[in-house]
Amino acid sequence: MAVCVAVIAKENYPLYIRSIPTENELKFHYMVHTSLDVVDEKISAMGKALVDQRELYLGLLYPTEDYKVYGYVTNSKVKFVMVVDSSNTALRDNEIRSMFRKLHNSYTDVMCNPFYNPGDRIQSRAFDGMVTSMMIQVC
Amino acid sequence: MDAPEEPLPPVIYTMENKPIVTCAGDQNLFTSIYPTLSQQLPREPMEWRRSYGRAPKMIHLESNFVQFKEELLPKEGNKALLTFPFLHIYWTECCDTEVYKATVKDDLTKWQNVLKAYSSVDWLIVVVENDAKKKNKTNILPRASIVDKIRNDFCNKQSDRCVVLSDPLKDSSRTQESWNAFLTKLRTLLLMSFTKNLGKFEDDMRTLREKRTEPGWSFCEYFMVQEELAFVFEMLQQFEDALVQYDELDALFSQYVVNFGAGDGANWLTFFCQPVKSWNGLILRKPIDMEKRELIQRQEATLLDLRSYLFSRQCTLLLFLQRPWEVAQRALELLHSCVQELKLLEVSVPPGALDCWVFLSCLEVLQRIEGCCDRAQIDSNIAHTVGLWSYATEKLKSLGYLCGLVSEKGPNSEDLNRTVDLLAGLGAERPETANTAQSPYKKLKEALSSVEAFEKHYLDLSHATIEMFTSIGRIRSAKLVGKDLAEFYMRKKSPQKAEMYLQGALKNYLAEGWALPITHTRKQLAECQKRLGQIENYLQTSSLLASDQHLTTDEREYFCREILSFASQQTDSPGHRVALPMHSFAQLRDLRFTPANAVVHVGGVLSVEITVCSQMPVPIHVEQIAIHVHFSIEKNSYRKTAEWLTKHKTANGVVNFPAEASPFPTSQSSLPALELYEMFERSPSDNSLNTTGIICKNVHMLLRRQESSTSLEASSGLALEDGAHVLRCAGVTLQPGPNTIVFRTQAREPGTYTLRQLCASLGPVWFVLPHIYPLVQYDVYSQEPQLLVEPLADSLLAGIPQKVKFTVTTGHYTVKNGDSLQLSNVDAMLILCPEENRAVIYSNTREKVSDALLRVQSSDKVTSISLPAAPTYHLIEFELEVLSLPSAPAAGGESTLLGVTEPHGKHKDTQKTGHCMATTDHKVSIDCPWSIYSTVIALTFSVPFRTTHSLLSSGTRKYVQVCVQNLSELDFQLSDSRLVDTHDSTDLRLIPLNTESEQCIHSRQAVFFVWELKWTQEPPPSLHCRFSTGFSPASEEQLSVSLKPYTYEFQVENFFTLYNVRAEISPPPGTEHCRTGSLCSLDVSITRLSDLLEVDKDEALMESDEYFSTKLMYEVVDNSSNWAVCGKSSGVISMPVTAQATHRVHMEVMPLFAGYLPLPDVRLFKYLPHHSAQSSQLDADSWIENDSLSVDKHVDDQLDSGSVKSRGSVHSAASSEHKGLPMPRLRALPPGQAFNSSAGTQVLVIPSKDDHVLEVSVT
């Protein structure tokens, strides 16, 4: 499953980032941050087409030796980045898509919370729980 | 197959292999035709319809024509497709039946039999016709016959298997036609053969694939089979299809590896799990790497061999397809997946071997792509290749670390052994790259050979990668590579080179608010700065790290100690300071002033309490905390008065500072806060406001270009302000978390003090908060002592005791015991001194301090109030009662006919129209102890009443009515009201008709009093009266002083009735009632009621023989237009001045309306004849005052209301007088002298029957 899940604000600062505790957290921070390059590239490349097709899934951003980084962008340009282990070959595009959809739904719930200030770090326990389930659940 | 030395051209590479077509029969014939055939065959494309629903393709066919041999035919089970003959052609030129029967038929049969034996059905017989040949022969059969024969003999049902080619070497249309037909046939048959044979092959292949679960199945065997198919497709230039074959193989293999990982291992796969012994990278320069292919064929290939070979084939095909960027992308995937697969299969790999393989492969792919693309193409597709570049960089880096090439001392023996092992695994360089200078092999070998070479290669690669990332806008990736580079430099002990990269990366992370990378990079930067000896920067970074929540406590304490140890060091230059920004050290949370409004008088004590949140992990002892204060004297100090300040400043005195949102710095918080100030510009001449605005004092910091601020954390702009005004607090220990620090200061100079900077000093280290924002100010004021006297109520009322509040603002003056206020007494105002009067002392902030008994001593002239002792900047408040004596106020503005009363003394009476009260000002001069000058205070008292009087008549009986109006808000009790004749005429009596002696007069209400006037003898021409009434507030309890009554003096003149006017309207004779429109008679009788009196003696009086008469003018006016007076409406009569003399006047009037109509008015005027002597008596005023008679009449209307106002002036009528003509003058009779006895009577008028006539007359 996912080894790192990040929600990144429109301005590219992290709203939420969590990785599996066994690994070096810093590495994932760098990885997710670097992946924003590709996210930006994909968003600008897709441009209008993206808006028209309402395709939010950006697909594989870039693979590394050990990890695959996938991206997703909401209509409000909030980015979701998910890092999965390369050795986890069971995860296909469809699974990743559905995971992103789940993430998006949960994020929408967070946004619906009247006490949440858009742009603040996400501290919702429900969101956290959902991310945890994504990290441990085996597909 | 020699690899080309020079890069391959980007055009489609044609394989030497072509589908094989065998030729049997007349070889000479074929040889002659071959050039044309081989040229013509590929000229036109042919549509190839495919099985399994694959899309049809247009295909250009080529063939390799070989002589038919039996060996060429594949034996059963032979899967080779490349050597498979797809079509067999028999060529013959025979046109002679004999020859045919003799040789050709036999030959054909033999050929056919061989084909049949190998069950090959793809054949064609070509009969070439040659006209020239025909001519030579004698027994020529018709052309068709030989063909027919062949068809008969060999093509049972397939007559199309025999074609005729006519005159192939001639250039005629017939030849052309024949060629076309032949070529079409040939192509069709070839394609048919392809479809059939490839279909069969694919079926076989699929069958083989289905057997993959069976034991003994070998991937390598299958690989070879499917590759055969790929070769054929490639041969047919169907690269797409060829690529599909390899992709299928790739996927199949990958799936096996995955399954193996999942525990489902295939036997054959174990072979690929053998330890990696060779890592010489991909080889992409040859279309087919036969060496590796043979390994696969021999089932000796390792995983890397298989992958390499597979990829090299894919690469070749992709390049044929002109998709080089896909090569790059696939290469990266391949390299990643290979690494993963080796891991998954638990293949033992010597350390670094894979790094070598990946490095070599990356470079090989890149060079291969560069070889077939031009510079511009490459530059515009960096996005595709940059991944390989960075991967190669990464791998080279790890190789460097592995082989000890990065350490300062160079590799040790262990490292060298490892390097040797790694180089051994590379094997010898391939012959195809041996002559290339920059081949990956050479590069790697060189890089591993020495520290210097490694550095060169690594830097080259890194720089190239950074440049590429930057050029395509992948700044973050570039920074990350840069960070690796920085790490490398740090290892190489060149921190000055590392710094730039670290700063760049840090700036990027800071701008986007990535906390963990920030912390990590800062840590590296701190190390770097420490080595560089950038003390200030190092301390600053340390302070940031010490306050960083993402570090462990130990790390934070370490950095904290770094600062402390520097701070405790003895510096050689004592004045040297290191100024660091405060925010990392501590954060200002809030600030609280005491007094809360932050306003303090000169000499007063102000305390500022700040809450500072220490970010340090340990308690820090700070030598001094100081607030630098900017002092400014307000020039136009109107708003700096104590009153203004105490009223307008915020009450609570707490200023909260927004917490710095450190996790999301983005761009805002890196900018300093706006420093805004008000600005007023006044004109120098009259000090009026010209312009006003706000000034931002730190524009230079806000508006500078983002880029130019190279280092975000540089301590630039931390200028310490050296102001004379500093609030200090020494020796403070800041505990981690919130700390409260109190500053005390004694205010000295008046003005505004703005807190500008907060500064904490630790030896030479100064933590500075350069701008305190929001703006915090406190004000110091100085104040002159001041006395303020103001009434408690809205206005003071005269006549009753009223409270007045005295406020002494001590200002800078200290009120000592014995200081007193000396009030000069005013006659008409009493200062009442009740017992037990207390003065209250307040501080300037209106807090009650104490109260004291107030001693008031009165003498004749002076009232002395001893003030209680009070310190500076306090308020003394007390109340006194004052009483304005009511004797003073006169009957407001009453001017009677004679003898206008003078205003009393200094009292200014200001009676305005309406309901304003008359007021009286009393000026009191007060001597204050702090000043040699007297303070004059004016107290204005309002007279609560307004009194009017009027004379009422009834025939000859006279009444005086007095109306008292209460204008104040209070209710009063009136008592003992009386009216006296001031002249004390004995024969005059005033009989009160008022029943109650006490009366309540409510606010805004009036009370009327009436007296009847009785006289015994001839009444005097004028009457002087004084009305007086006692009054006291109705609600008040017993008053301490007796109040003086309220008086009102007035005069009534000519009150005696002289004439009685009586009017009567009678209906026309013979009718009972008046009718509208019909004339009625109006009879006016004017009766003199008395003999000659003193008042008659004026110029109208005429005397002749003891007989007096006076001239009167009467006038009938109907102001309400009820009546139309017909004929003369006025006239002058001579009235004898004797009692009961009556004058009657008859007039005709016509009622205009029906109903009870009031009678028209009859007015009497004194008719004063023109007298030359008299004209001199007329003062100029009267000439001007009266411009017309109508004015007079108007005034007369008012007369009826009873007010006696300015009655006496002589009215002269007629404007003609102004022209100099002598005209008689009219004077209205005073209201008392003429009594209208018919006033108020009404006459009944009934409507006329003829309405119509009436209407006309009205209009």
Image: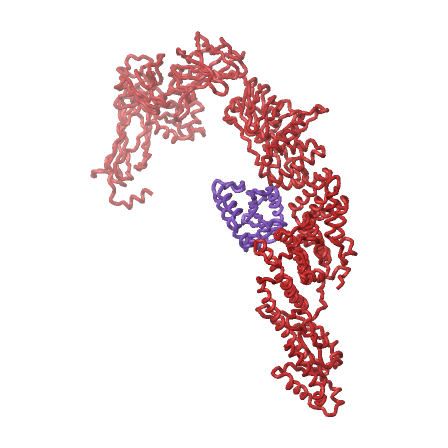
Chain colours: A purple, B red
Residue B876 versus residue A86 in the image, above or below: above
Q: Position of residue B539 (x, y in %)?
A: 66, 31
User: Toward the viewer: B101 or B177?
Assistant: B101
**Residue shown at 64% from the left, 86% from the top:** B152
Question: In this rendering, would B995 be left or right of B428?
Answer: left
Residue furthest bottom as drawn? B139
Q: Position of residue B1015 (x, y in %)?
A: 27, 16
Labels in figure, total: 0
Q: Quadrant of residue B1028?
A: top left
**Residue shown at 31% from the left, 32% from the top:** B1116
The quadrant in which the C terminus of chain B is found is top left
Residue B672 at least partly seen? yes
Residue B841 versus residue A125 in the image, above or below: above
User: Toward the viewer: B818 or B668?
Assistant: B668
The quadrant in which the N terminus of chain B is found is bottom right
Question: In this rendering, would B1154 be left or right of B528?
Answer: left
Q: Position of residue B827 (x, y in %)?
A: 43, 11
Residue B1100 at least partly seen? no
User: Toward the viewer: B778 or B1192?
Assistant: B778
Question: In this rendering, would A38 be left or right of B1046?
Answer: right
Residue furthest top as drawn? B859
Q: Position of residue B1036 (x, y in %)?
A: 34, 17
User: Toward the viewer: B424 or B337?
Assistant: B424
